[in-house]
């Protein structure tokens, strides 16, 4: 309750108080004036948010590269280059992303081996269809009308 006009005028409006409270709640772990002075706190908070957004993007890029490196190593174990693995799975219409393939390569090696075999066969069939020749001793489901 405001008993005097001077007391009423000195109190900040509620919106302003909550706005400042929001900024200080976001900067409470900063050091020095970066958490105590409102203007500096706003600048520090905005800088921290920009850096966090950049870090989230870099993390996604790093993790995708990690998946690809792991898949390269796992596919090389089975005698299949990574590029042939990806193209072969695309030809076989196997829609498994790199994250799941990496988990299969690490935790389910037998399953990954069968997936790599599917990719090898479908990549070979794609090459046969492109060249028009069929290697000896290989039976495929490709039907040619000659």
Image: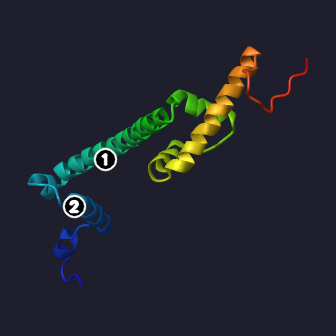
Mark nearer the viewer, 1 or 2: 1
Please say if 18 is above or below 61: below
The image position of residue 46, as x and y in percent, is 28, 47
Q: Residue at x 18, y 80 (%)?
A: 4
Q: Report the coloring of the rendering.
A: rainbow
Please say if 36 is above or below 102: below
Q: Which residue is mark 1?
A: 52
Which secondary structure, mark 1?
helix
Residue furthest left in the image: 32
Using residue 26 as the reference point, say whether residue 31 is left or right of it. left
Please say if 104 is above or below 118: below
* The C terminus - image quarter: top right
Query: In the depicted view, which residue is nearer to us: 35 or 129?
Result: 129
Label at residue 24: 2
The image position of residue 78, as x and y in percent, is 51, 36
Using residue 23 as the reference point, say whether residue 63 is left or right of it. right
């Amino acid at each position: 309750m405001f008993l005097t006009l001077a007391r009423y005028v000195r109190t900040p409006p509620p919106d302003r108080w909550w706005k400042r409270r929001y900024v200080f709640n976001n900067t409470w772990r900063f050091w020095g004036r970066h958490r105590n002075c409102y203007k500096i706190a706003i600048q520090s908070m905005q800088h921290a948010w920009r850096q966090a957004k950049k870090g989230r993007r870099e993390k996604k890029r790093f993790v995708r590269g990690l998946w690809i490196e792991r898949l390269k190593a796992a596919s090389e174990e089975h005698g299949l280059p990574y590029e042939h693995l990806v193209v072969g799975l695309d030809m076989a219409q196997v829609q498994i992303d790199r994250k799941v393939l990496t988990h299969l390569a690490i935790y389910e090696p037998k399953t990954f081996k069968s997936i790599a075999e599917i990719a090898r066969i479908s990549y070979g069939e794609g090459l046969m269809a492109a060249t028009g020749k069929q290697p000896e001793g290989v039976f495929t489901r490709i039907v040619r009308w000659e």
